[in-house]
Amino acid sequence: SVQRRHNRMLNSSHDHRLLALMDVEGFDPKEVTVTVKDRKVKVSAEHEEEHTTSRGKEYNYKTVMKEISLPPGVSEDEVTYSL
């Protein structure tokens, strides 16, 4: 389950200062962007698929975005992330 995966990730973290987890399942790592600016971490992901059917072309598009403020005492250059 998602909750069990979340708990495993929290428990396996070497540094217990985990700021956030974000589910980007279904996105290719190249489709995920992480920026740190103005004391905020912004994670966004966009995915588009094109399918040809008997009725023509169909497009599926999904996007997610999350913005998190850094806690006091954490500098922007300390932020790391992994997929």
Image (cartoon, grey):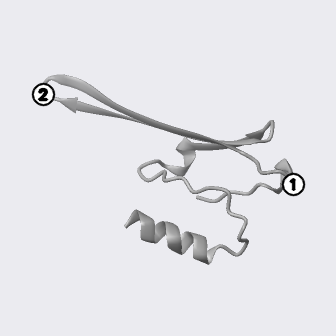
Q: Secondary structure at mark 1?
A: loop
Please name the amino acid that badge 1 sits on. Answer: Gly
Q: Is residue 48 left or right of residue 35?
A: left
Kindly indicate the quadrant of the structure image that contains residue 1.
bottom left
Of 31 and 15, nearer the camera is 15
* Image quarter hosting the C terminus: bottom right
Q: Name the N-terminal-most of marks 1 and 2.
A: 2
Of 49 and 24, nearer the camera is 24
Crowd around label 2: few <14 · some 14–19 · many ≥20 (10 Å): few
Q: Is residue 43 left or right of residue 2?
A: right
Give the numbered dot on residue 73: 1
- Residue 40 pos. (x, y %): 74, 41
Please name the amino acid that badge 2 sits on. Answer: Ser
Mark 1 to mark 2 CA distance (whole Å): 57 Å
Q: Residue at x 73, y 65 (%)?
A: 17
Give the numbered dot on residue 47: none
Q: Circle 2 sits on which residue? A: 54
Q: Is residue 10 left or right of residue 77?
A: left
- Residue 22 pos. (x, y %): 54, 53
Q: Is residue 73 left or right of residue 62?
A: right
